[in-house]
Every structure is written in C-alpha cells, then in structure tokens.
Amino acid sequence: MPKRILQGTVTSDANAQTVTVLVERRFTHPVLKKTIRKSKKYRAHDEKNAFKVGDTVRIIECAPKSKTKRWEVLEA
C-alpha cells in the first residue's frame, strides 16, 4: 500500500527534531452541499530542525518514531 503524503503548515517547532503540522482538508457536505473545512494536527519528524513556524511542508507516513510521531517531513 502506498504511503500517504499530506501538505500543511508548521504550527510549532518547540520540540527537538519534531514539528507540529496543521493539515487542512475541504469537502462538500453530502446533504447541505456546503464546502466545509476541517483541520488536523500531525507531529512529524524533522531530523535537522530545518523547518520553522509558518513554513509549508509535505509530510509522509513512516514507521512509528515515538508515541505520537508517525510522519516524517518530506520537503518544504
């Protein structure tokens, strides 16, 4: 099965080698036919601490690195 790749914005870089990425998705409500925005935060591994708050990054699924990290930063 292919690994998922998501795009989002870095909202926190306070922890060592970890960034928090906010990923937003849009979809049409099945009944109301209204466009809805939903967002979710993912914790991603950033080996070199290269990304700062506000950067747009792509993240990819990986094997668990810690209790909460299951994603790696792919590129900016």
Image (spheres, rainbow, N blue to C red):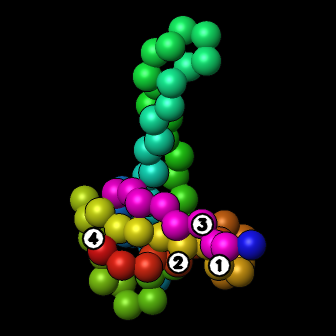
Tell me the element at label 2.
strand
Question: What is the spatial separation of the Cα atoms under label 4 and label 2, in whole angstroms?
Answer: 15 Å
Q: Which residues are magenta?
A: 2-9
Three-letter code for the amino acid on which mark 3 is drawn: Arg
Label 2 is placed on what type of residue?
Answer: Glu
Say the numbered circle drawn on residue 52.
Answer: 4
The mark nearer the N terminus, 3 or 1, is: 3
Residue 23 rendering spot, x and y as whole percentages: 45, 51
Where is 29 relative to 58, above or below?
A: above
The residue depicted at 74 percent of the width and 72 percent of the height is 1
Q: Is residue 55 magenta?
A: no
- Report the residue marked by disc 1: 62
In depth, the one of 72 and 67 nearer the eye is: 72
Q: Residue furthest bottom?
A: 48
Q: Residue at x 61, y 10 (%)?
A: 31
- Number of numbered discs on residues: 4
Residue 4 appears in which quarter of the rendering? bottom right
For disc 4, the neighbor class at 10 Å (few under 14, some 14 to 19, many from 20) is some
Closer to the chain start, of discs 1 and 2, is: 1
Crowd around label 2: few <14 · some 14–19 · many ≥20 (10 Å): many
Query: x%, y% of residue 13?
Result: 37, 69
Say which of marks 4 and 2 sits in front.
2
Residue at 46 percent of width and 15 percent of height: 34
Q: Is residue 44 visible?
A: no
Q: Earlier in the sequence, mark 4 or mark 2?
A: 4
